[in-house]
Image: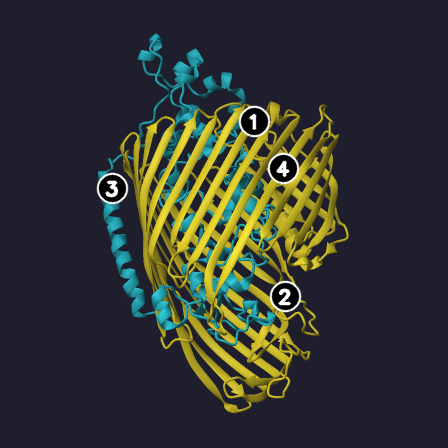
Chain colours: A cyan, B yellow
């Protein structure tokens, strides 16, 4: 089975894609200068300086973080426990002593005048410019691989919408504090959070899980930014390993349309978190292609249950009572054992 | 095990020195943050404790621990439903803990944090432990233990007697997971890492043993685990990055179904004058799996106006199954109408799924206000399997071996291009197109003469969106998708769909923020044999009022009204006459929390709120969880707290699934 033709037929175009990628990267690498210096993406330093001040004619200079501390003592203290403080102390990163200005730009004019217009505030920039400030350092990291495939990056949601640059780690969203992550996501995705108030849901309101256990906010190759597991499998199987397979007999919708073909993972009135109020309707809506000609006519896959399924009796209204291995079976093609 | 994990997590904290007396609380941030206001509802008590921040060079131990006792009052209604939905129990608990130790000049670590909740037998236990030493290592450990219980009376035949389980498909299991990752030399250009993940579930349940013309609810023992190992290296440079990772998994699934009691099953009548029953059963599954996976990720910024990303992913899980079944009783072979009293089956199967995926994406910034996003993705796999099943029954004493197998192939591709234009400082618009196509081969339905059937996928999607910003006070973001499909895999797959969302935030006052949210999805498959239509609308509004930064009072609330409707034709199996499957739901959901903090060092803090969900339609349901919390500082570093919640659920059409429960807890919060 391992050497079946389909495997190589399906993989060949992908390898061509891979070598194309290698060629593009080789070209890109060749285009790089030999020295490995940071990319200076043009980012506005601040709002256009007022013409009435003579100092506006000369470029601002770096003044160091201690100058910033004079007025922004509270932020300065909090920042010392933030991950970004590493910029302040590590010389190799070339921002030592001026970490504040690594994001806010040179601050001499702002320090002299105290005017907000003379300093760059990433939170007030348009998302593309704000994002470039962060991506000066963070563009080339694993988290960015899915940014253009899906997720917030495509919709112009800036990094600072979720990430705090100044706050201490205890208030960060990146260290797995579940309640904080969920609250942050819910502040925009209100309707989704409302679904979690239904009785049958994943355990997010209980803070046993967080949104990012299932979704990758930085983007993913899968629809709805679903996380991946084992390189390219749906993230659902990270916890539901017994449903992962491969099974001798796969239930095709599980593989082709994913778990959400039948389940509403955010919350449901159905005790099995199904997309319909009763299980039989979930099954029968798909299993209603009558005969082979009907399959061709409707263009959909699936058949109809045999005639002995008497829906008038309760015995046949709960399909998974008999089709116990509905996610896939290793023994029986009808998923009966 | 639990104790060991907890001790391991807390061990470094025990080694800390006495705290310095001059510790300054973290000052609230005043400016420069665009982060949306975070609702405080449902936040763990431990997380709410502000961590003192000391000078960067000092060792600081901070955090909080909530310990106490929980009482669950008499549960009214269906206690199985309570356990399915809530499952909180009595007893002493460590409700929350959140501890951190900072030691910037330490030899072995800069920072150690540990936090978790639900220790003491709760259904949701978590522990997270992190330790870092700058430029040396970054370690994290995550443990979860979640109880899943579902014994709702979903019996196929409620009249069957005896039915000791009151359900024919239930389970009572614990699912645990461990995630660990160790990164060496974080923040440097070459970062090797090792990771280990283990996920396992064990418990008992009820499942049907299915025989011809009857099925028997029997006890089910469940155990499965997956171990994942991976190692890789990140090469991170200013203009490019590469991640290479190699991993592997092992999988085990041992399920045992057994009974020694005479079981009449669901059939209430005799068949050809004989009663069908089960008297003994042993059904054992022994599934062993293993697999490898590889990841190669690349990003590059060759020019200031160009970002390139790509990935190549491969996995190949395999499983081997040994199956044994021994059953005695009175059974019938439906095909031959022969009765038999004992049956034995042995099965051996294996399955293999090579799975390759790849992505390439790029962002071009040809002009300062223009971004072009291009993304391509492919996902290809097939499952190939074989099975040998030997049936030893009374009328085939030599055994009848059946050989079989299956195949499933799928190729999925997606290409999308999008242009984002910053029209002005306050308006960004975006538009694009997505094309999704693919094909699949699956096993044909049993009723047909075919062995396999083929499905195709072809869908064109138009994309549009905008974002408006007026300073930091007003923010509106909208997205829309309009899709048309020539071919889809299944009758209810996304076909001709329209999807839209609008999210808005308005900071009316410095202390008052209003939010709004609208989401819509309509999906149709107009094929006359299907006539599937789905409409879903959700409208939300919320507010947060926290005058003076929430020093004395914070009020937050949100409300969502949602409607869902779907119709699809299906065929009654006996008559093949068309019927319509109709599902309707209109739901109101609200959550609110009011926080009062009395003035003074020892002023109490009172929180009142909760959530409610009520729906009408095909399955009317109400679920209420009001909440009262009181916290009183009784010493500088000690607070007494108590919490009362009421859980109430009712279903009009399934009244036996309703329940009511009072849950009260009290304890001490120890702060440092």
Instruction: Establish if A121 lies above or below B188.
Output: above
How many residues crowd mark 4 within 10 Å: few (<14), some (14–19), many (20+)? many
Point 47% across, 33% down: residue: B504
On screen, residue B135 above or below A115: below
Q: Which residue is mark 3?
A: A28
Q: Position of residue B251 (x, y in %)?
A: 49, 64
* Whether residue B272 is visible: yes
Q: CA distance from mark 1 to mark 4?
A: 15 Å
- Looking at the rendered structure, whether the residues under marks 1 and 3 are on a common chain is answered as no
Mark 1, residue position? B512
- Going from N to C along the chain, the mark reached first, 1 or 4, is 1
Q: Are marks 1 and 4 in contact (CB under 8 Å)?
A: no
Q: Are marks 1 and 4 on the same chain?
A: yes
Mark 4 = which residue? B592
Task: Name which of mark 1 and mark 2 comes first in the sequence.
Answer: 2
Percent position of residue B647, x then y: 69, 48
Q: Is residue B309 visible?
A: no
Q: For mark 3, does the 10 Å Cα neighbourhood hold few (<14), some (14 to 19), or many (20 or more) residues?
A: some
The residue marked by circle 3 belongs to what chain? A
In front: mark 2 or mark 4? 4
Q: Going from the N terminus, do you reach mark 2 or mark 4 first?
A: 2
Cα–Cα span, label 1 and label 2: 50 Å
Mark 2 element type: strand
Per the image, label 4 sits on a secondary structure element best described as strand
Can you identify the residue that label 2 sits on? B204
Q: Position of residue B418 (x, y in %)?
A: 31, 41
């Amino acid at each position: 089975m391992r050497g079946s033709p389909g495997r190589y037929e399906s993989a060949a175009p992908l390898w061509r894609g891979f070598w194309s990628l290698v060629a593009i990267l080789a070209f890109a690498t060749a285009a790089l200068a030999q020295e490995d210096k940071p990319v200076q993406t043009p980012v506005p330093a601040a709002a256009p300086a007022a013409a009435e001040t003579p100092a506006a004619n000369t470029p601002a200079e770096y003044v160091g973080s201690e100058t910033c501390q004079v007025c922004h003592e509270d932020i300065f203290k909090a920042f010392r426990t933030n991950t970004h403080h590493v910029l302040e102390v590590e010389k190799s990163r070339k921002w030592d002593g001026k970490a504040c200005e690594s994001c806010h730009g040179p601050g001499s004019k702002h320090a002299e005048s105290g005017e907000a217009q003379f300093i760059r505030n990433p939170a007030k920039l348009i998302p593309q410019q704000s994002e470039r400030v962060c991506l000066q350092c963070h563009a080339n990291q694993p988290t960015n691989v899915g940014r253009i495939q899906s997720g917030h990056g495509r919709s112009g949601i800036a990094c600072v919408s979720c990430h705090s640059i100044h706050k201490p780690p205890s208030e960060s969203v990146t260290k797995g504090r579940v309640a904080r992550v969920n609250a942050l996501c819910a502040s925009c995705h209100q309707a989704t959070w409302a679904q979690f108030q239904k009785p049958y849901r994943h355990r997010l309101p209980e803070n046993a899980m967080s949104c990012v256990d299932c979704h990758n906010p930085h983007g993913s190759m899968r629809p709805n930014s679903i996380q991946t597991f084992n390189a390219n499998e749906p993230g659902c199987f990270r916890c539901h390993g017994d449903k992962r397979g491969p099974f001798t007999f796969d239930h095709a919708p599980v593989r082709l349309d994913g778990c959400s073909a039948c389940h509403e993972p955010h919350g449901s009135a159905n005790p099995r978190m199904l997309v319909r109020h009763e299980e039989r309707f979930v099954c029968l809506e798909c299993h209603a292609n009558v005969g082979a000609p009907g399959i061709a006519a409707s263009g959909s896959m699936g058949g109809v249950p045999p005639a002995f399924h008497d829906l008038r009796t309760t015995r046949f209204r709960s399909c998974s009572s008999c089709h116990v291995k509905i996610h896939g079976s290793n023994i029986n093609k009808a998923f009966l054992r | 095990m639990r104790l060991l994990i907890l001790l391991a997590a807390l061990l470094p904290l025990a080694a800390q020195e006495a705290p310095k007396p001059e510790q300054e609380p973290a000052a609230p941030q005043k400016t420069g943050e665009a982060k949306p206001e975070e609702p405080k509802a449902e936040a763990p008590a431990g997380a709410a404790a502000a961590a003192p921040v000391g000078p960067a060079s000092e060792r600081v131990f901070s955090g909080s621990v909530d310990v106490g006792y929980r009482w669950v009052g008499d549960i009214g209604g269906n206690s199985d439903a309570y356990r399915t939905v809530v499952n909180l129990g009595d007893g002493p608990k460590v409700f929350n803990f959140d501890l951190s130790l900072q030691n910037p000049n330490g030899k072995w670590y800069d920072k150690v944090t540990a936090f978790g909740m639900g220790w003491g037998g709760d259904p949701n236990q978590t522990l997270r432990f992190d330790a870092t030493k700058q430029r040396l290592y970054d370690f994290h450990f995550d443990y979860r233990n979640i109880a899943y219980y579902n014994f709702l009376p979903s019996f196929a035949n409620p009249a069957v007697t005896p039915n000791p389980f009151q359900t024919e498909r239930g389970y009572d299991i614990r699912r645990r997971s461990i995630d660990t990752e160790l990164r060496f030399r974080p923040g440097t250009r070459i970062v090797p890492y090792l990771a280990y993940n283990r996920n396992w579930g064990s418990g008992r349940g009820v499942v049907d043993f299915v025989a011809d013309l009857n099925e028997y609810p029997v006890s089910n023992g469940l155990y499965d685990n997956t171990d994942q190992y991976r190692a890789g290296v990140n090469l991170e440079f200013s203009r490019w990055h590469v991640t290479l990772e190699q991993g592997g998994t092992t999988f085990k699934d041992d399920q045992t179904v057994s009974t020694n009691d005479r079981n009449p099953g669901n059939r209430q009548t005799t068949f050809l004058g004989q009663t069908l029953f089960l008297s003994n059963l042993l059904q054992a599954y022994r599934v062993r799996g293993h697999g490898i996976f590889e990841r190669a990720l690349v990003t590059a910024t060759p020019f200031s106006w160009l970002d390139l990303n790509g990935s190549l992913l491969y996995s190949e899980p395999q499983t081997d199954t040994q199956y044994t079944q021994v059953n005695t009783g009175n059974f019938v072979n439906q095909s031959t109408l022969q009765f038999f009293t004992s049956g034995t089956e042995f099965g051996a199967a294996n399955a293999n799924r090579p799975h390759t995926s790849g992505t390439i994406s790029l962002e071009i910034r040809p002009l300062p206000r223009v971004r072009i996003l291009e993304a391509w993705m492919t996902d290809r796999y097939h499952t190939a399997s074989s099975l040998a099943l030997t049936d030893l029954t009374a009328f085939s004493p030599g055994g009848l071996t059946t050989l079989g197998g299956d195949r499933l192939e799928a190729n999925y591709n997606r290409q999308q291009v999008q242009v984002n234009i910053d029209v002005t400082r306050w308006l960004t618009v975006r538009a694009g197109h997505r094309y999704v196509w693919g094909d699949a081969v699956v096993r044909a339905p049993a009723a047909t003469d075919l062995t396999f059937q083929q499905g195709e996928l072809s869908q064109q999607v138009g994309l549009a969106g905008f974002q408006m910003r007026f300073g930091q006070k007003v923010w509106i973001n909208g997205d829309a998708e309009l899709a048309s499909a020539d071919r889809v895999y299944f009758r209810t797959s996304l076909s001709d769909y329209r999807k839209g969302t609008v999210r808005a935030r308005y900071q009316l006052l410095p202390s008052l923020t209003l939010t709004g949210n609208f989401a819509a999805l309509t999906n149709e498959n107009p094929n006359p044999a299907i006539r599937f239509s789905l409409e879903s609308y959700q409208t939300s509004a919320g507010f947060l009022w926290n005058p003076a930064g929430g020093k004395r009072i914070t009020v937050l609330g949100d409300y969502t009204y949602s409607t869902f409707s779907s119709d699809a034709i299906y065929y009654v199996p006996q008559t093949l006459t068309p019927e319509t499957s109709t599902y309707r739901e209109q739901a109101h959901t609200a959550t609110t929390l009011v926080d009062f903090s009395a003035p003074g060092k020892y002023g109490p803090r009172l929180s009142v709120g909760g959530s409610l969900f009520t729906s009408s339609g095909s399955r009317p349901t109400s679920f209420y969880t009001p909440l009262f919390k009181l916290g009183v500082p009784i010493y500088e570093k000690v607070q007494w707290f108590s919490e009362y919640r009421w859980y109430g659920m009712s279903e009009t059409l399934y009244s036996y699934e309703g329940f009511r429960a009072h849950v009260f807890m009290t304890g001490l919060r120890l702060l440092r």
